[in-house]
Amino acid sequence: MQSEKDKESQFMVPAVDESTGEETMQAKYLYFEGRPREYRFNGQNGQFNLYGDTVLTDKSGRLMSSFSFQPIAYRIFEDCLFGRSLREMWAELFFIDTDSCVASIMFNNTSVNELYRLLEPILYERKSLCDVVITVKPERITSKADPSKTWFIARFTYEPANPESVAEMREYIKLHRVYRAETLTVSAEHKLVSQGYYMAIDPLADYSLDALPAKTDGAA
């Protein structure tokens, strides 16, 4: 049986120190715990970007018309995030990007409903989103009440992922605590959580009034 050290070594690769020329070992996949690389889908213009600033383009420099990735962990939940006043449905998916960084992307509301449409047949095949490669394509929606108002939702398709890649990612997720600290709150109501997602805080019930010890008569 492999030790934890041996398992971790499979996610190390040789690298050369540019200052000394010496060969060293470095992480195969770059990840700062709780702070994955942040990809975003902009529902106002249908664009994909990094950190809300760098718009993603293809090799020809054109805006990306689709975005594909293989989830390694995910969760679907309801919460009030990013200073918004209402609770909304969110889907948070984690993956390894083309730069070998652990990354995340989020979708909300109507796009989450679209993700559920994709997910249902996958679950009935006794699989999960971590067994497939997802492709996201923006689709423009026009308001029926006011045709001058438009926005974009995410449409999802999938294809089976490479079994070797699935096995590697499952091993990786066992050894690394993958989550995004900024979006993890005690008030979240989870609908679906993958086995690989790391719940870094206790559930809300632990902090509720019902969980506090009752006061005895005469207590201050």
Image (cartoon, helix red, strand yellow):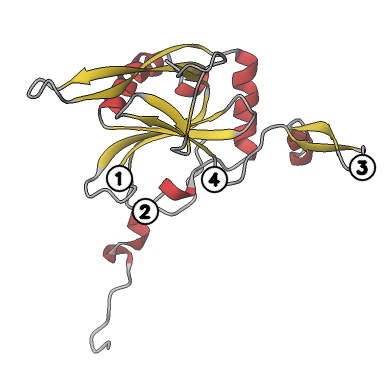
Q: Real-space Cα distance between discs 4 and 1?
A: 19 Å
Q: Real-space Cα distance between discs 4 and 3?
A: 30 Å
Q: Real-space Cα distance between discs 3 and 2?
A: 47 Å
Q: Amino acid at mark 3?
A: Thr
Residue 148 appears in the picture as rendered: yes
* Structural crowding at the residue carrying mark 2, measured as other residues with C-alpha within 10 Å and reported as few (<14), some (14–19) or many (≥20): some
Q: Which mark is residue 186?
A: 2
The residue singled out by tag 4 in the image is: 35
The residue singled out by tag 3 in the image is: 20
Q: Dot 3 lies on which element?
A: loop
Asked if the residues shown at circle 4 and circle 3 are in contact, with their CB atoms under 8 angstroms apart, the answer is: no
Q: Is residue 64 above or below residue 53?
A: above
First reached walking from the N terminus: tag 4 or tag 1: 4
Quarter of the N terminus within the rendering: top right
First reached walking from the N terminus: tag 1 or tag 3: 3
Q: Amino acid at mark 2?
A: Val
First reached walking from the N terminus: tag 3 or tag 2: 3
Q: Which mark is residue 134?
A: none
Q: Nearer the viewer, mark 2 or mark 1?
A: 1
Q: Real-space Cα distance between discs 2 and 4?
A: 18 Å
Q: Is residue 67 above or below residue 2?
A: above
Task: Indicate left or right for 47 with 31 as reference.
Answer: left
Please identify the residue farthest to the top as the structure is shown. Answer: 159
The residue singled out by tag 1 in the image is: 79
The residue at the point 78 percent across, 40 percent down is 5
* Structural crowding at the residue carrying mark 1, measured as other residues with C-alpha within 10 Å and reported as few (<14), some (14–19) or many (≥20): many
Q: Quadrant of residue 92?
A: top left
Q: Is residue 82 above or below residue 103?
A: below
Q: Real-space Cα distance between discs 1 and 3?
A: 49 Å
Q: Quadrant of residue 189?
A: top left
Q: Amino acid at mark 1?
A: Asp
